Image (tube, helix red, strand yellow):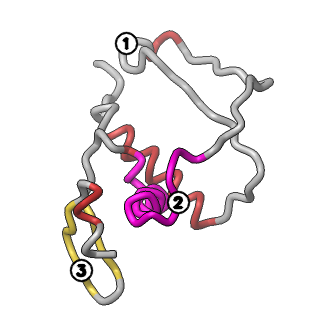
Amino acid sequence: MAEAIPYLGLDIEDRSGDRLRVEYSPNRPDYSTDYGIAMGLQGLLGVRRGMAQLRIRDGKYSIKADTSVSKIRPYVTCIAAKGRDVDDSLLKQLISMQEDLHAGLGRGAERPP
């Protein structure tokens, strides 16, 4: 796996035992979790090809964003995913991805003075 990771455009920062620490570009938030890297490796290694098949439809939920944040976050989106329990490991992955999106693509924006 360590030999394949650079072909995904990822840099190996540290290798200790059976663990790798990688650096990814903020332009590839799909690689911010080990799940995303695993999906990329599946395609690269020929295990599974193509996009993940998702059933997408309009839901019953809506987003209400306060207008006071429109200059910081002019666009907002969300997803309600069903069919899988959220255990501690998955929750940590989701939080990590959200923080990376905020720091990278969101540029770590905070409230204006």
- The CA distance from mark 1 to mark 2 is 41 Å
- The CA distance from mark 2 to mark 3 is 26 Å
> Mark 3 falls on what kind of element?
strand
The mark tally for this picture is 3
Badge 1, how many Cα within 10 Å: few under 14, some, many 20+?
few
Labels 1, 2: front one: 2
Looking at the picture, how far across and down is residue 18, in whole percent? 35, 86
Above or below residue 30? Residue 14 is below
Q: In this view, does 86 lie to the left or right of 15?
A: right
Displayed quadrant of residue 64: top right
The circle drawn on residue 71 is 1
Q: In this view, does 89 lie to the left or right of 27?
A: right
Looking at the picture, how far across and down is residue 62, in whole percent? 70, 21
The circle drawn on residue 62 is none
- Which quadrant would the N terminus be assigned to in this image? bottom left
Extent of the magenta region: 30-52
Displayed quadrant of residue 113: top left
Above or below residue 107? Residue 66 is above
Labels 3, 1: front one: 3
The residue positioned 38% from the left and 60% from the top of the image is 44
Query: In this figure, which residue is indicated by the disc labeled 3?
Result: 15
Query: In this figure, which residue is indicated by the disc labeled 2?
Result: 48
The residue positioned 59% from the left and 61% from the top of the image is 90
> Mark 1 falls on what kind of element?
loop
Answer yes or no: do the residues labelled 1 and 2 have beta carbons within 8 Å? no
